[in-house]
Image (cartoon, helix red, strand yellow):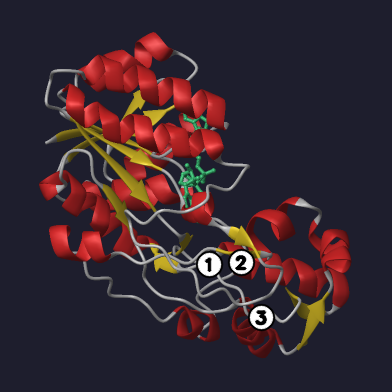
Amino acid sequence: MKVLIVGASGFVGSGVTRHLADTHEVLGLARSEESADRIASLGAEPVRGSVDDLDGLLGHAAAADATVFVPQLLQDLEHTTVSALLRSYAGTGKTFVFTSGTGVLGQRTFGEWSEDTFAEDDEFVTSKYLVQRRHTELVTRAASQNGVRAVVVRPPAIWGDGFHPFVGDILTSVDKTGSACYIGRGLNLYTHVSLDDLAELYRLVLDRGVAGALYHAAGGELNNRTLAECVARVHGVQTRSVSIEEAFEIWGKFTPLVTLGVSSRSRSPRSRRELGWSPQRTDVAQAILDGELNGKRRS
Ligand SMILES: NC(=O)c1ccc[n+]([C@@H]2O[C@H](COP(=O)([O-])OP(=O)(O)OC[C@H]3O[C@@H](n4cnc5c(N)ncnc54)[C@H](OP(=O)(O)O)[C@@H]3O)[C@@H](O)[C@H]2O)c1
């Protein structure tokens, strides 16, 4: 299969590109020379373009059998671009994979545990900040009625290639306060997945994903306090609980409100049942303790 990857040079896109390049002919959309070099180093063929040049993008998509959409865009641009790509694939039977994220089902608990955990097709109240993204998920799934093999992948927090987003945030707190900080009791968590396991899910989706399906990718769970304890052990510092007000001082508003203060728990029964997906790297605590993960992205 000839696969176009939009966002191939990004953190998630790089992992997916590298993995798919083993089994497919992969074209990676590159909007700069630097991104083109990165994509070539992953074993894919860079094609020049940008989401901002829609006609060019549609041309690249038309030349492929499948498009995997994994860039980081503002939600409005994401929605209009995905909608245009889906229209261009109508009636072709081609594959389109939209990457969402479990932020859509997140709830702010500011350190408290939540027992709510969601399988792919469970009902939930959409985060008010991600209503447009949820709408893009629904538009993608509906395109399956229109002759597109359209699928949504909704990953949780992703770690790999030396990087873990929450470890990066905790290291910021070490730099600023001398302690590895978590909010409140630190019992909240984002379900996580390793980048390699997520990349394998995309391969399985291309291979046998069902039109109109949505797939989760739950690798494991570790609450924020335990994450902070792992970071503290590696860096020889103490942990500390902070109030939401202090969290804003350390991280600004975005991180406490959108990730560190949120519970986003997901399960993947459909991915396991329908695709045979089975994550291999689930022990993120050990990866941190082994010094494998820090706050810096390679891409
Ligand atoms: N990281 C996570 O833990 C996580 C978890 C769940 C869901 N997701 C979702 O996964 C997606 C990718 O996230 P990420 O962390 O990989 O982001 P990232 O590392 O920031 O990568 C962004 C990618 O988007 C490309 N891009 C940005 N603007 C573009 C444009 N106008 N035209 C074409 N390409 C453009 C970038 O290209 P350049 O290299 O040229 O800048 C890069 O390839 C997002 O939708 C995100 O919500 C991520």
Q: Amino acid at mark 3?
A: Ala
**Figure quadrant of residue 200:** bottom left
Q: Amino acid at mark 1?
A: Tyr
SS at badge 1: loop
Q: Which residue is mark 3?
A: 228
**Figure quadrant of residue 56:** top left
Decide which of tag 1 and tag 3 comes sooner along the chain. Answer: 1
Q: Quick one: quadrant of the N terminus?
A: top left
Q: How many marks?
A: 3
Position of 7 relative to 268 (above/below): above
- Which of these two is toward me, 101 or 235? 101
- Which of these two is toward me, 13 or 279? 279
Give the percent coordinates (x, y) of residue 264.
52, 63
Q: Report the disc number at residue 166.
A: 2
Q: CA distance from mark 2 to mark 1?
A: 9 Å
Q: Amino acid at mark 2?
A: Phe
CB contact under 8 Å: marks 2 and 1 = yes
Give the percent coordinates (x, y) of residue 125.
52, 51
Q: CA distance from mark 1 to mark 3?
A: 14 Å
Q: Report the disc number at residue 190.
A: 1
